[in-house]
Amino acid sequence: MKNSPLSTRFRIPASFGSLLGLAVVFLLFSLWAGPPFYSRYNQVTMLTQSVIVAAGALGMTLIIIAGGIDLSVGSMIALSTVVIARALLAGAPPTWAALAGVAVGGVCGALNGFLVTRLGLVPFIITLGTLLIFRGAATGLSGEQKIDAPITWLNEMLTKFPSPSWTLVAVGVWLTVLLAIAVAVVLRNTVLGRHAFAIGSNEATARLCGVRVERVKLYIYTIGGLLTGFAGLMQFSRLTVGDPTAAKGMELDIIASVVIGGGSLSGGRGSVAGSLAGALLMTIIRSGLSMKGVPNWVQDVLTGVIIVGAVTLDRLRRESGGSE
Amino acid sequence: MPAPYRIEMLGLRKAFGATVALDGVDLCVPPGVVHALIGENGAGKSTLMKVLSGVQRPDAGRMLLDGDPYAPSGPLEARRRGVVMIYQELALAPHLSVAENILLGIEPASRGWIRRRKLEEQAREALAALGHGEIRLHAPVSGLSVGAQQLVELARALVLDARVVVLDEPTSSLAAADLSRLFEVIRRLRERGVSVIYISHFLEEVEQIADRFTVLRDGRSAGGGLIGEADRSRIVEMMIGRQISEMFPRLPHPTGEPVLELADLAAPGVRSASLVLRRGEIFGVAGLIGAGRSEMLRAVFGLLPVRRGWVKVATVAGPGSPAERLAQGVGLLSEDRKGEGLAQSLSLADNLTLSNLKPYLRHGWLDRSAQSRAALDWVEKISIKAPGPRVPVFSLSGGNQQKVALARLLHHDCDVLLLDEPTRGIDVASKAQIYELIGKLAQTGKAILFVSSYLPELLGVCDTIAVMCRGRLGEKAPAGEWTEHAIMTAATGAREAAR
């Protein structure tokens, strides 16, 4: 007997809902706002604008799947921009400065993972603490002000007019796409990825089955931190300065992206494609609304409604479908 | 020469503080034997199995596995040595697939990359060895029935070449069809030379599947032997440690006018329930876990919405919130004492008076000494063992906690008591006291709806019994007309299927 009937081969992926939502919202705005919205220029702009939140959401997806949460990512991004600017000021080559920015994210993530696994406190509390610690560290390291860095190619990573022009979008967008593929493959095809799902799904069972829960969590938070460090690099590229006040509150956008994309805050569920769709969805809504001159406060209210609505819809869909 | 026994547990002792959970227990099981471990809740069964599976270490005594010393440092080592526990609450990762669950923690991989083909092959082999190759490997386990989930856990035991498999109350939530399927799988395990330890208090099941049995009571072996040679009432007496008649004293009590009526009640988990409960009546509700018994009580008490039909309390018909029900004199004793029934960190006095603080209010301020005095009154009346009225409830034993929860309903002066598993997880002495208290309450004209999964107590205490099966409450009949067999048949829907 063959083990997999057709229905399982073509099972609807968890990210289906958010991808569908993305398509619908894009269509609606295209009808409402017309060519200025769906022009190639605006598409490139929206893609580029999504990159920072999307990169952060990649790391957050891993962490949320494993049943964790990281509130400190906004602060990590700020710290990363400051480190990059300081490194450039100190005369480091741009590549090394960029790597330092990514690495500092990894160190922060490792610290989060270490504290979560060693202190036995819930990650919400730990990362609420490190949110302040990292923000403070960024402010201290920058001497409480923005750091102007010399102009390098790092500032071009999120340009809307990439050269050569056949690359279509900026190198930062392409790097994010590559990282997304890598994270998706890790989640699907490695022991680490499956153990992350197992821990988020039922930690006690994972432990009982000999999964090294602490080690996996440490790795997950560290990888999450590295990806957040990359988001910091993208943030630096956009700002062209090291800014200790950058990305304040961005952790909420990042978490919202993952949740809109089908991630469950109780763990065990989430997907890379969904999270990316979530990040894009939020950019599209903001971009479309401001193009139509909708005031900021209405945008905030609508974004909030969409987050709650998307998650409710997702739950209804899963309940009506019975088992996943 | 090979050891005659697969697993030997000799003179095991384990104490938690002042409570002695195991007091010198011996249990030896040869290979290829299904050994039933019988006993009431709190008799020490689960502690014994925790020691066996490495979750807890014994204070004294030793264990041998195939003649070799066996002292697992944790559940992981126990699993590696081939001792596998299948818990009552299934230990699966609901979001992972069947195959991934079977091989969780031991995935075939090279350099961190999962070898899917190998993984699926091994999972398929394990399921086929159980005779259940039809279970789909890619399906997430959350979509499987409870019975199929149990098979996945058993398959997990097989891929590890288990030598000893422990099943903890494996049938408490199974339908009849799943039950026979499980027994078939257990027989296959036995043929493969696996020693199976089967924990249950359903004696009929034990008679069907086990070869030998041991009865535990109060942390000691109270007897044992070959199943075929044992008489069932003798086993029950070993379990409760006294004559059945002493355990369930019958107090004469007349029944009066109806105080609670349900007419074709439907609620989440309840398809249809009709009943009439009279003053002074003890009405038992039997059924499997998940049959909708608790849901019925909760719908009556206003914790679940009523979807159809009606509830009539005394002469008032209609739905009600928990606060309104309490005002009408209807009280619910929750089955979840820790999570819902009691506020664990509050004191005995606070818990006891929580639903009715009015008598202790002086100009809006709580008179704590009056509250304490009232609590002490109840402590004496129903002999709660507690150092004082202001001790936190979590410091009391399970039996005394349950008496506090019950005392709250009495303090509230409820006339209709909805008792959901009132004796779950408490010691035999407290049980006997609670049975006696229920009898006395009926004598004073209280009406009691008594949900329980433990058949001897339903048969011993209740005047009338009805059985719930898949959300439907059957006809009630006098307790004397029921037998354990008849109740189990009705509860598993066997009668329905035969029709």
Image (tube, coloured by chain):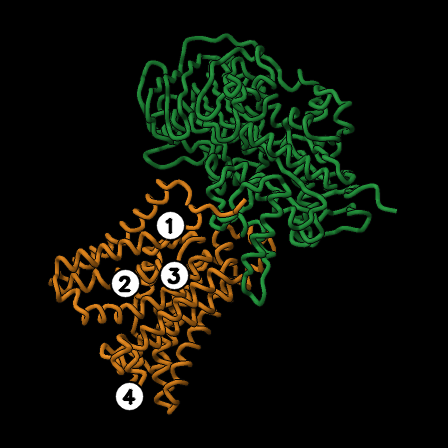
Q: Residue at x 18, y 72 (%)?
A: A41
Q: Quick one: SS at disc 2?
A: helix
Whichever of callouts 3 and 4 sits on the residue coming sooner in the sequence is 4
Distance from Cα at disc 1 to Cα at disc 2: 21 Å
Q: Position of residue B167 (x, y in %)?
A: 64, 38
Label 4 and label 2 in one chain? yes
Q: Circle 2 is placed at which residue position?
A: A280
* Chain displayed in orange: A
Crowd around label 3: few <14 · some 14–19 · many ≥20 (10 Å)? many
Q: For this rendering, which residue is in front, A148 or B368? A: A148
Whichever of callouts 4 and 1 sits on the residue coming sooner in the sequence is 1
Q: Position of residue A177 (x, y in %)?
A: 35, 69
Crowd around label 1: few <14 · some 14–19 · many ≥20 (10 Å)? few
Q: Residue at x 25, y 57 (%)?
A: A23
- Residue type at the position of mark 1: Ile
Q: Residue at x 58, y 25 (%)?
A: B454
Q: Quick one: SS at disc 4?
A: loop
